[in-house]
Amino acid sequence: MKNEVIEASKIIISTGSEPIPLPFAPFDGDWIIHSGHAMSLPSIPDSLLIVGGGVIGCEFASIYSRMGTKVTVIEMGEKLLPEEDDDITSILHGELKDQGVTVHISTAVKNINAASKTVFLENSDGELEEMHADYVLVSIGRKPRVNEMGLEENDIDFSRLGISVDDRMQTSNPSIYACGDVIGGIQLAHVAFHEGRVAALNACGQFAQVNYRAIPRCIYTSPEIASVGLTEKEARQKYGEIKVGEFAFSASGKAVLSNKPAGKVKVLVNPQYNEIVGFSIVGQHATELIGQGTIMLHAEITADMMEDLVAAHPTLSESIHEALLNSVGQAVHC
Ligand SMILES: Cc1cc2nc3c(=O)[nH]c(=O)nc-3n(C[C@H](O)[C@H](O)[C@H](O)COP(=O)(O)OP(=O)(O)OC[C@H]3O[C@@H](n4cnc5c(N)ncnc54)[C@H](O)[C@@H]3O)c2cc1C
């Protein structure tokens, strides 16, 4: 490899993140794989064991089960997608089960024997089990890529959580900015893009700050899950009492017509000013619908302001309006 030195008055670091292996089983790419490998397997496997029921694990479970693979998900926590509300994840859990995915919650992978292609499990009751699969996809999290970049020599503060930056994306070295997965926090493409824009503007002498107020979170399972703002659990912790408005897609003409009525819209409202503080949607096109909630949170719109909105019928969008009406006791079709 040819060495080259490039000089610049300002530098932006955006080296991303990398998958975390199990401590006792490094990735080999042949049998113990990460998400990168899972996107380019030579053929559709008969069986796939997924370690970790977070976003990436659930997405690959959904993708491969729909292609005919026998999928098993092992999750050490008490439920899939630990960040999202129980009522939202339980709908996905049920749908995955109906699609033939086997999910073991409260179960940890204790060891792996690559030679015999055996995975050793232990559940919370101490029961042991052995499993076999064509591939073991390990999706237990990602870590910022901070090694071998000379961060220490350049006085750039960092930890295992990522490079430290202020809200202008500037590191502890004023000439160096960082953005995206390498700073930890919310590891999503649109967040990295927004942070990159802020870093570039500041590096070019302008003043820009990141806005994390309304970041949509999209999960591309079947059905999709999308949320923005606080979850119900977080909203109750922050405000105590909150108003919750819901609308089930089984009451939506458009969802029923498409034969995919599973799921619902949930909106969370702070009763003090009826400010909308969170949306969670599970169901078809949830990742498109969340755009409406994102705008409402970004613009700090209240539930009262939405009461006399006219939503087109029949659309999935009117479910958002119905959930908002439900939150302020004005629902008509719930
Ligand atoms: C399986 C999977 C699915 C995902 N799905 C979604 C999704 O649906 N929506 C979403 O918003 N986000 C999704 N993400 C997250 C999203 O991919 C990341 O948040 C986003 O790519 C982060 O952007 P980044 O620029 O910080 O890092 P990256 O996109 O990872 O880019 C970093 C780049 O830097 C390069 N690099 C690293 N070190 C060096 C070096 N020393 N020298 C030169 N180059 C280097 C890397 O090769 C890489 O190309 C997903 C992630 C995974 C793993």
Image (spheres, rainbow, N blue to C red):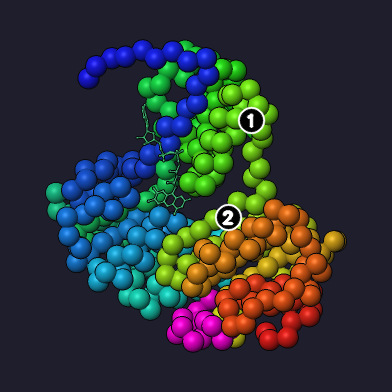
Q: Is-magenta flag for residue 25?
A: no
Q: Is mark 2 within 8 Å of ligand 1?
A: no
Q: Quadrant of the C terminus?
A: bottom right
Hey, what amino acid is under mark 2?
Pro
Image location (x, y in percent) of residue 161 = 51, 35
Image location (x, y in percent) of residue 46 = 19, 66
- Above or below 188: residue 233: below
Q: Residue at x 54, y 44 (%)?
A: 191
Image location (x, y in percent) of residue 238 = 74, 54
Residue at image mark 1: 168
Q: CA distance from mark 2 to mark 1?
A: 21 Å
**Which one is nearer the viewer's eye here, 36 or 138?**
36
Viewer can see residue 126: no
Q: Quadrant of the N terminus?
A: top left
* Callout 2–callout 1 Cβ contact below 8 Å: no
Image location (x, y in percent) of residue 333 = 68, 86
Badge 2 crowding class, 10 Å Cα cut-off, few under 14, some 14 to 19, many 20 or more, is many
- Above or below 254: residue 284: above
Residue at image mark 2: 216
Q: Residue at x 36, y 66 (%)?
A: 62
Q: Is-magenta flag for residue 253?
A: yes
- Ligand 1 is found in the corner quadrant, namely top left
Query: Which region of the structure is painted magenta?
Result: 252-263
Q: Residue at x 20, y 63 (%)?
A: 44
Q: Can you tell which mark lies on residue 177?
A: none
